[in-house]
Amino acid sequence: MAAPSAATIRSCVEAALPLAERLFTQLRQHTADGPGVSREPYAAGEQYAHDLIAAAGRESGLEVATDCAGNLYVTLAGADRSLPGWITGSHLDSVPMGGNFDGAAGVIAGLVVLVGLRQAGVQPLRDITVMGVRAEEVSSWFGGSHKGHIGSRAALGMLDLAELEQAVNVRTGATLAQQMQAAGFPPAALASAPPYLRPERYHGYLELHIEQGPVLERQGLPVGVVTGIRGSMRARSARCIGAYTHSGAVPHEYRSDAVLATVALVGGLDCAWEQVRAEHGDLVFTVGKLYTDDQAHSITKVPGEASFSIDLRSQDLATLQAMEARARALAESIAAERRVRFELGSFDLSPPAAMDAGLQALLAEGSRELGIACGTLPSGAGHDAQDFAHAGFPAGMVFVRNAHGSHNPDEAMELADFSLGTQVLAWALTR
């Protein structure tokens, strides 16, 4: 059977855009948190989003299912169901007080494709399944030692269930295992279930996502094809232990100042980052958390403890490994010099992931056929697509232009750009 033309794809997507607009509006209204939205993993906000998408799928006559981890699957049957199907989608949770489009745009784009094709009477060659992923943003809500991306890794059989006990809610102190149990998804069920998604059953995974940086906007392009996803090396709960003493009575050479020692470590890592950049390597480095104990600190005390995080990201695994070694060596030398002790803990590794070259070419071909201006760029942020790539799926991503960055309430994806990105996605999914 012939794949639908570019004109048919454009018509199908545009016809289903009112559904997208309605879903975005309902998500914003029902998960609002101040100026932004909060859709906490395995809590009310994320569950509302899953229920909303599931209901829209059922109302449109699509197949709806969930797995043991609570991931959602909405499927349009293909003409030959024996063929490996496509899977598309993204996550439906958010960071605290984040933006409305991060993650949700990918799920809604997939649903628009399915609904638009079905309304037009266009049956794809193979099944197309939209996945609403659980707990991609879990690192923003849960501390402790875990590797994030809980929903996708659970579906792919890549999740160590011990992580669910080690991940602790920073607000309530509950473990992720307890929160999943309370939400109706007992971790025990995962222990006995085979992987829900296997690469041999799928033609590939495609994810539409807003760009979380300024590249497409600066280049004046509505859509981009992602070449690869940076991996990360993270120390989530590092500490420096010194000694609390009087701020006026203790000379410099006798102090064990945890803050100054931490600042020295951060400065040393910043210098290492500059060195990597000077050698044309790929690296970004962030200390997103840095704080003293509000129960013990005082303006008149030398700080005896500082807590912090380290987030290293690169497209090169060797660079990440070298930076972890550099952090540990710096911590050891600074500790000796400043009479403190560092407890960096483990660094959680999420390896870099290259996007499939064939899918990159397919998406670029679709943009040309549709007459849509399209660039190429790497992703500095992590996405569920990297987990699919690591599990052996051909994986690709479409970025949609978005002003003001992401993980904040000011995300500003235009519906016209969303339509263009969704058309590129639809073209690829119907090949």
Image (cartoon, rainbow, N blue to C red):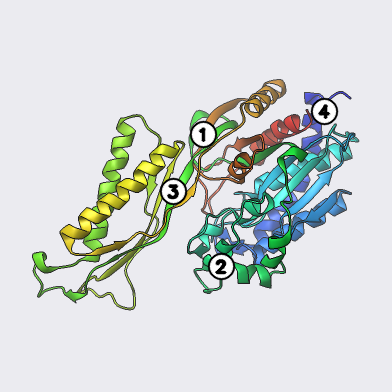
Quadrant where the image shows the N terminus: top right
Where disc 2 sits, the SS reads helix
Q: CA distance from mark 1 to mark 4?
A: 30 Å
Res 165 label: 2
Residue 301 vs residue 125: left or right?
A: left
Residue 41 vs residue 195: left or right?
A: left
Res 8 label: 4
Quadrant where the image shows the C terminus: top right
Q: Nearer the viewer, residue 244 or 407?
A: 244
Q: CA distance from mark 3 to mark 1?
A: 18 Å
Give the amino acid type for the residue marked by disc 2 in the picture: Glu
Say whether marks 3 and 1 touch (CB < 8 Å). Answer: no
Which comes before the other along the chain, label 1 or label 2?
Answer: 2
Res 378 label: 1
The residue that disc 3 covers is 233
Position of 401 relative to 161 (above/below): above
Q: Position of residue 265 (x, y in %)?
A: 26, 53
Which comes before the other along the chain, label 3 or label 4?
Answer: 4
Q: Position of residue 339 (x, y in %)?
A: 18, 64
Q: Position of residue 95 (x, y in %)?
A: 55, 57
Q: CA distance from mark 3 to mark 2?
A: 21 Å
Which comes before the other along the chain, label 3 or label 1?
Answer: 3
Q: CA distance from mark 1 to mark 2?
A: 33 Å
Question: Mark 3 or mark 1, which is nearer to you?
Answer: 3
* Residue drawn at 16 percent across, 58 percent down: 337
Where disc 3 sits, the SS reads strand
Say whether marks 4 and 2 touch (CB < 8 Å). Answer: no
Question: Mark 4 or mark 2, which is nearer to you?
Answer: 2
Position of 47 relative to 60 (above/below): below
* Residue drawn at 67 percent across, 21 percent down: 368
Q: Is residue 240 visible?
A: yes
